[in-house]
Amino acid sequence: MVEKLTGEGRKQALGHIPGWSEVSGRDAIQRTFTFKDFNEAFGFMSRAALVAEKMDHHPEWSNIYKTVEVVLSTHDAGGLTVLDIKLAKAMNEIAGK
């Protein structure tokens, strides 16, 4: 099982994922991605889903038209872990952000 990020390691990890912020009242991070249209948003979700499945680490997310809202937290660890940071970085790369 992967362990929660704390202290300086957590601070450094969060500094390397632009656009993501901590969720108030929860040990998680979030980001809203906005695309040109639904097709781009759905394409992003499809590519991100393949990465998430390969990692066996799945996001909490929703899609409304061209907007995808994502929350990442490792439920087994009870909070933010390196898995969340890796998936956040992958999502940024997929989105070109």
Image (cartoon, rainbow, N blue to C red):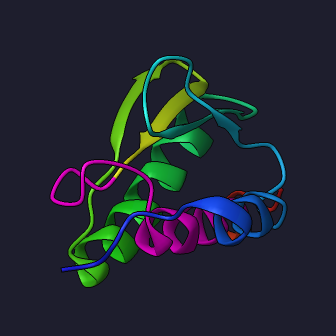
The picture quadrant where one finds residue 93 is bottom right
- Depth check: give the residue in front, 65 or 86: 86
In the image, residue 57 above or below residue 63 = below
* Residue 44: % across, % down: 54, 53
- Depth check: give the residue in front, 84 or 1: 1
* Residue 20: % across, % down: 71, 43
In the image, residue 21 above or below residue 54 = above
The picture quadrant where one finds residue 71 is top left
* Left or right of residue 28, residue 31 in this image: right
The residue positioned 39% from the left and 75% from the top of the image is 51
Q: Most extreme residue toward the front, as rendered?
A: 7
The residue positioned 50% from the left and 53% from the top of the image is 43
In the image, residue 41 above or below residue 16 = above
Task: Point out the image quarter for the C terminus.
Answer: bottom right
- Depth check: give the residue in front, 82 or 30: 82
88 in magenta: yes
* Left or right of residue 59, residue 72 in this image: right
The residue positioned 67% from the left and 72% from the top of the image is 9
The residue positioned 49% from the left and 36% from the top of the image is 70
* Residue 39: % across, % down: 54, 39
62 in magenta: no
**Number of numbered discs visible in the structure rendering:** 0
First to last magenta residue range? 74-92
In the image, residue 50 above or below residue 54 = above
Task: Point out the image quarter for the N terminus.
Answer: bottom left
